[in-house]
Structure formats: C-alpha cells, structure tokens
Amino acid sequence: MSTHATLIKPPKSLPHHSPIENVLQLLPLIDIGPDIYTNARPLWHPPGARGIFGGAAIAQCLSAAQATIPPNFTVHSMHCYFVLAGNSEVPILYHVERVRDGKSFITRTVQARQRGKCIFTTTLSFMKENSGGRQKVEHAVRMPTDVTPPPASNTVASADDDRPFESVRCPVTQRGCPSERKLRQWVRAVGRISECPPNVREEEVSSGERANKPGDNHQAHLSALAYMSDSYFIGTVARVHNLMRFANRRTIENTLRNFKGSDAEREQMKKYLEDIAREEAEENKEFGGAPPDDSRRIGMMVSLDHTIYFHNPRAFRADEWMLTEMESPWAGDGRGLVVQRIWSKDGTLIATCTQEGVVRLQQNESKL
C-alpha cells in the first residue's frame, strides 16, 4: 500500500508567509464534507520520537476550529489528548464538530484521523471579545526577573536549519529538588508572520461579515504559539532529574542507524541531536550533575494530554521573543506532570499550559 504525506499536492509556499504559517497551512476538503480539513504539507517527525511532533496536531486542530467561528470570538482554552502516534507519511484529516454556538461562548471539538483512526482529539472553547464586562477581577503571575535577555540579533537559527521556530535556553537558576527546579527558554517563530488572516470562510467574505484587513491575523499567532508550546514539554520531567537522553554518543548513533533519509538530511539530524546533547550536558552541570551511582535511563517518554489556557490571546506576536518557564510538580507511577507559563517580552502572561505523559525508566530486572 503506497503512502503519501499529504492528500493533495502541497501548494507553493507563499513568499509573504512565515515558515510556521506554511508548515501549519490547512486545506478544506469541501467535496468530502463540511468542516473537514487536511494538512497541506508533510509534518515533522522529531528524531527518536514515536510519531509526528505533537505541536503540529495541536496547532492544526486549533486552526481548523478557528476556521469555523466568527472573527469576534477568540480561543481561551483547549484540552487535548494524544491517542495514537501520528505517521508523518500519511495525511491527517481534521474533523470539526460544532458543539455549541452561544452568545458569549462557542464550543468545538476536533478529531485528527489517519486511516480512519483517531490519533488526536481536542475540545476548544472560544469567548466573544470584550464580553467580560468593564469591571473585572484581574491578576497574573509576573515574569521572572532573574533571566538572561533574549538575543538582540535578528535570528539565531542557522542557514541550514529549516525548523519554523527558534529557541534559546536560559541558564538554570533554580537548583533544589526536582519539583523546585525551573527550566526557561526564549522562543519565537522564524521570520515575520503575515498580516493576512488564515482560514477565512468564503461565506464570511461574500457576506461582508469578515473583511480581510491588515493586522487581523491573531489566529496565526495563536496557532504558532500552540505549535511551540509542545517544545521540550514532557521532557522536563527527565531534565529536572538529570536524566539525559541524547548526551551520549551511543544514543545518537542508534538513532542515526535507523534513519532512512538522504546524506544531507542525516547530517542535519546529527547536528540537531548533537545540539540537544550539548544543551543537556550544560543543564546537567548547572543542576550539579547526576550522582555517580545513578544508573537510571529513560525507557519510554510520550505525551498523554496537553492543555492550553490562553490569557491574553490578542496581546502578543508569536514571531517576537516569548519567555517560557517549565516545572514539574509531580512524577510517579510511570507518569509525570509539567506546568508551563509563557510571557511576552514585555511581561504579559500569554498562556498557561499543562501536560501529563508516560515517563518510564528502563527496568534492570535481576535474574533469578
């Protein structure tokens, strides 16, 4: 049985779109049914992962749901479950269900399916803009002040790096026990996100309900944020325990041994893994290093669920530096929980995310 990464031949990348917009582009499948979309381009399969990058499913489900709501409603929460590993060689169909359209809130569910099976599901809630009233209860966690500022240069990504976003790790300042350690990094989308609204519904344009106005592209920034929110997320559990995954030559060699791409792609993957290994080693040293008798190794680590609460969905740009802070309040019984906060560079709390995942160690069974 032949496989194709997309259902429809990928369209040409638009020059005024940023790389992350092109990666996340969806195509409506009107001939199949209403509110059904598919990925326009192949999705990234991270080295060593069981399937596609989870952030792609999160972001494209959000994009599909956003295509079915009026422009004066904005997402405020989405609750996701990873059901099966996504195959990067098979198209994904995103099925949107219009659960409820209320005066102040709209609810949608989206299922991502491959070969008839649900691989990812999410429920999203959208709130009407300015429906909270003039007087509000307001507070927010402040952005940490003991962090190094982001780079001042236009880009930190290398010319041969085609990832749609870039990140810069901050040195560790919170050392304590695993539950007290905090991991921080600056992230942003590569390039400049366009001012053209994505996924504009044809009936909105024809009726005049939605004008294609410059600057009305907050949905693209929200989808980009959703994509980046899954970067290094569940891996936080291993990192706060000094359990390094790639900071050893054998792990990298084993990963490359199973790689089926071209020589150029192999070199790019090798560089990607070595960069992670270097960051792991630096972080491990900052945490004080693992005890010399610690023989624990990660045997399995996969995400189970992912939640995003969008606090100020129209008050940021995803192509400008944002600070993320991750911590793990609990791990046990083969699972771990991570909490992430994201601030804009000016200190506005943009989102709070949580993720639980399977975190299992290699079991050294003694022979009887």
Image: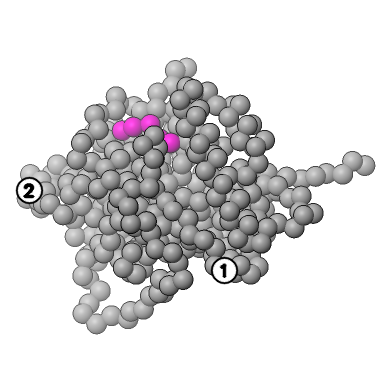
Task: Assess whether residue 255 is covered by the magenta stretch.
Answer: no
On the question of residue 223 being in view, the answer is no
Q: Is residue 67 above or below residue 93?
A: below
Residue at the image point whose x is 40% and y is 71% from the top: 143
User: Label 1 sits on what residue type?
Assistant: Gln
Residue at the far front in the pictured view:
153
Per the picture, the main secondary structure of the magenta-coloured stretch is loop
Residue pointed to by mark 2: 207
Please tell me which residue lies in front, 296 or 220.
296
Please identify the quarter of the rendering in which residue 186 is found. Answer: bottom left
Q: How are the colours assigned in the image?
A: one colour
User: Residue 39 location in percent, x, y?
Assistant: 34, 35
Residue at the far right in the pictured view:
368
- Regarding mark 2 in the picture, which secondary structure is present there? helix
User: Residue 266 location in percent, x, y?
Assistant: 50, 27
Please tell me which residue lies in front, 158 or 328.
158
Residue at the image point whose x is 61% and y is 50% from the top: 281
User: Label 2 sits on what residue type?
Assistant: Ser
- Regarding mark 1 in the picture, which secondary structure is present there? loop
Residue pointed to by mark 1: 174
Residue at the image point whose x is 37% and y is 56% from the top: 151
Residue at the image point whose x is 36% and y is 28% from the top: 6
Please tell me which residue lies in front, 174 or 305.
174
User: Residue 226 location in percent, x, y?
Assistant: 38, 52
Q: Residues within 10 Å of mark 2 (few under 14, many from 20)?
A: few
Please identify the quarter of the rendering in which residue 28 is found. Answer: top left
On the question of residue 281 being in view, the answer is yes
Res 19 label? none
Residues at circles 1 and 2 in contact by the CB criterion of under 8 Å: no
Q: Is residue 317 above or below residue 201?
A: below
User: Residue 174 location in percent, x, y?
Assistant: 57, 68
| Residue stretch in magenta | 40-44
